[in-house]
Amino acid sequence: MGFDAVMRVRTSTGIRATDFFGSFFMSNTTDVELAGLDCDKAITVEFKHDDKLSEDTGALMQCAVLYTSCSGQRRLRVHNMAVNCCSQLADLYRNCETDTIINYFSKFAFRGVATNPVKANCASPSSAGQLILPECMKLLPVYLNCVLKSDVLLPAADVSLDDRAYLRQLISSMDVAETHVFFYPQLLPLTKLDGGSLPVAIRDSEERLSKGGVYLLETGLHLFLWVGASVQQELLQNLFGTPSFSQIDPNMTSLPELDNPFSKRLREIISDFRAQRPRFMKLMVVKQEDRAELIFRHFLVEDKSASGGPLTWTSSVTCTRKYANSSARPRPLFTHQPPPGHFSLL
């Protein structure tokens, strides 16, 4: 934990820091001033390429933070980073990190600034009806759709102005890992919990849910345990200590400590998720066709938003095609399907 901090970013010739995103104050164009700084805060830095760069020497960046420790000592922490350079934009996009791009785009969009399309340089040459993205960017369109549907840009009817302001302030200081799970929550099927590994995550869509299954959804701020109406009695007994679906208490915020491997492993997973996040995530048990299911569905980001906004994954692709066809310069269509689901500047 540090207090009264001042951060400055320096670079080698050819690139320079042009913008900063986060919760801070700037009295000039170079010094980032923070009243407090801890391990759960992040600052996103935008760099501009304005001169020739050498592929042999690469580019250098330095982040220096002067701060006061809890013991009252004035300290200086310096981070240095060297990155490779390339002469072809196609090589640049093939080696980019989608999670970091989304972290930047979300903060950029929430500031209310219009963004410019990057299709012309990141896509490979293709026919008029296609856009073949590099492998590392195949999730970018679905993540961008999630950003557009977020409660900051498109709040639901029950999201108050205070909640929206809170989320906007929260996202401004999120790091890459936090924005990843915030915009595309992690949905885990819990029918089988084998060994010490996590179940393979599935896509955030209602069509992926089974009436006979139990699923854990993590958003970075909340934990939801969705229970299908046709779950086997043995599984209910192992989880809740009751074989009846109707006897599950939807108001519980913690699972009963039962002496069986399934219960122990699930409670370990929940504890691990909470340990990874800077904020405590309250557990909500959601029974199928219960009123609380509306809240759970709000975070199934591949489905259409209840607030009428954009779009499912497929409909967002359709709108992209319509926009491309109406433009003076043809823009091909995204044709890949997103799999289930960082270059960090700090």
Image (tube, helix red, strand yellow):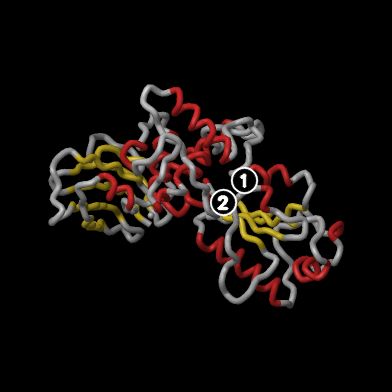
- Would you place residue 191 above or below residue 114 in this image? below
**Crowd around label 2: few <14 · some 14–19 · many ≥20 (10 Å):** many
Residue furthest out toward the front = 127
Q: Residue at x 86, y 62 (%)?
A: 244
Q: Which residue is mark 1?
A: 299
Q: Is residue 156 left or right of residue 287?
A: left
Q: Amino acid at mark 1?
A: Phe
Q: Amino acid at mark 2?
A: Pro
Q: Quadrant of residue 117?
A: top left
Residue 209 image offset from top left, x and y in percent:
70, 53
Question: Does the rendering let one see residue 134?
Answer: yes
Q: CA distance from mark 1 to mark 2?
A: 7 Å
Residue 25 image offset from top left, x and y in percent:
33, 38
**Crowd around label 1: few <14 · some 14–19 · many ≥20 (10 Å):** many
Labelled disc at residue 131:
none
Residue 92 image offset from top left, x and y in percent:
28, 49
Q: Secondary structure at mark 2?
A: loop
Q: Which residue is mark 2?
A: 185
Q: Residue at x 57, y 32 (%)?
A: 310
- Residue sitting nearer the eye, 119 or 284: 119
Nearer the N terminus, badge 1 or badge 2? 2
Question: Does the rendering let one see residue 163?
Answer: no
Residue 287 image offset from top left, x and y in percent:
77, 53
- Residue sitting nearer the eye, 134 or 77: 134
Q: Residue at x 48, y 51 (%)?
A: 180
Q: Secondary structure at mark 1?
A: loop
